[in-house]
C-alpha cells in the first residue's frame, strides 16, 4: 500500500504541474516601456503569474524609471501625489496594494502627458484605483496646470496594459 500511496502523490504532483503551472511558481521580472513626448518611461514589475484568468498575479513590487535626456529618476511605485495618497489612506486603503495595470500617452491641452492607472485588481471601494499624470518634463503633476476632463477621458480611452497583478497581461 505504501508504494501505491507514493505513486498517487507523485501522480498528483505531476498532474498539478503538468499543464504549464510549474513555471508560475517563480517570480519573474516584467518591464514595460513607453515614450511620451521626449520622455522615456519604464515600469518594472516582479510578479508570479497565477496561471488562472480569474486569479490576480502575485507581485512583490514595481519600480518606475523616467529618462528625460540625460536626467534619470527612479521611483518606487505607487508614485502618487500627496492628495491621492491621502485620499487612498483616508478611505481605508493601503498604498502597497496599488499596482500600475495600464498607462497611456496623450496629447493634452498642456502638451504630452503620461497617465498611469493604478488598481488593487478590482472592487468599487474609494481606494481600489488611482491615477497619476506626468507632465512633458517627466515630473509627477502635483501642482501647476490642471488637466481638463477631456484630457483625462482621452487618456482613459487610450490605456494600454502593463504586466503586473492582472491575469493575462
Image: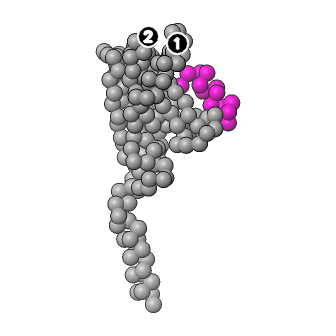
* Residue in the image at 52% along x and 12% along y: 146
Using the image, tell me which numbered label, if any, was put on residue 110: 2
Above/below status of 80 relative to 119: above
Query: Where is residue 17 shown, x and y percent of the image?
Result: 38, 65
Query: Where is residue 141 shown, x and y percent of the image?
Result: 50, 16
Within 10 Å of disc 1 (Cα), the crowding (few <14, some 14-19, many 20+) is few
Q: Which residue is mark 1?
A: 146
**Marks 1 and 2 close (CB-CB < 8 Å):** no
Query: Where is residue 44 shown, x and y percent of the image?
Result: 39, 35
| Viewer-proximal residue among 81 and 101 | 101
Q: Is residue 115 visible?
A: no
Within 10 Å of disc 2 (Cα), the crowding (few <14, some 14-19, many 20+) is few
**Badge 1 element:** loop
- Residue 83 is covered by the magenta coloring: yes
Most frequent secondary structure within the magenta stretch: helix
- Write down the region rendered in magenta: 80-92
| Viewer-proximal residue among 92 and 146 | 146
**Badge 2 element:** loop
- Residue 16 is covered by the magenta coloring: no
Query: Where is residue 105 shown, x and y percent of the image?
Result: 38, 23
Quarter of image, res 154: top left
Above/below status of 94 relative to 75: below
Above/below status of 131 relative to 62: above
Q: How many marks?
A: 2
| Viewer-proximal residue among 143 and 159 | 159
Q: Quadrant of the N terminus?
A: bottom left
Q: Which is more N-terminal, label 2 or label 1? A: 2
Amino acid at each position: 500500500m505504501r508504494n501505491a500511496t507514493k505513486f498517487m502523490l507523485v501522480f498528483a504532483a505531476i498532474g498539478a504541474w503538468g499543464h504549464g503551472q510549474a513555471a508560475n511558481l517563480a517570480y519573474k521580472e516584467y518591464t514595460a516601456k513607453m515614450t511620451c513626448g521626449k520622455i522615456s518611461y519604464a515600469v518594472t514589475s516582479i510578479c508570479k503569474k497565477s496561471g488562472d484568468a480569474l486569479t490576480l498575479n502575485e507581485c512583490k513590487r514595481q519600480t518606475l524609471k523616467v529618462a528625460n535626456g540625460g536626467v534619470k529618476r527612479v521611483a518606487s511605485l505607487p508614485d502618487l501625489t500627496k492628495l491621492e495618497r491621502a485620499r487612498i489612506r483616508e478611505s481605508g486603503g493601503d498604498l502597497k496594494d496599488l499596482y500600475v495595470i495600464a498607462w497611456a500617452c496623450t496629447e493634452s491641452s498642456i502638451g504630452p502627458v503620461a497617465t498611469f492607472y493604478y488598481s488593487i485588481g478590482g472592487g468599487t471601494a474609494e481606494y481600489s484605483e488611482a491615477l497619476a499624470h506626468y507632465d512633458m518634463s517627466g515630473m509627477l503633476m502635483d501642482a501647476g496646470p490642471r488637466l481638463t476632463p477631456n484630457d483625462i477621458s482621452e487618456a482613459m480611452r487610450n490605456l494600454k496594459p502593463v504586466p503586473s497583478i492582472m491575469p493575462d497581461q
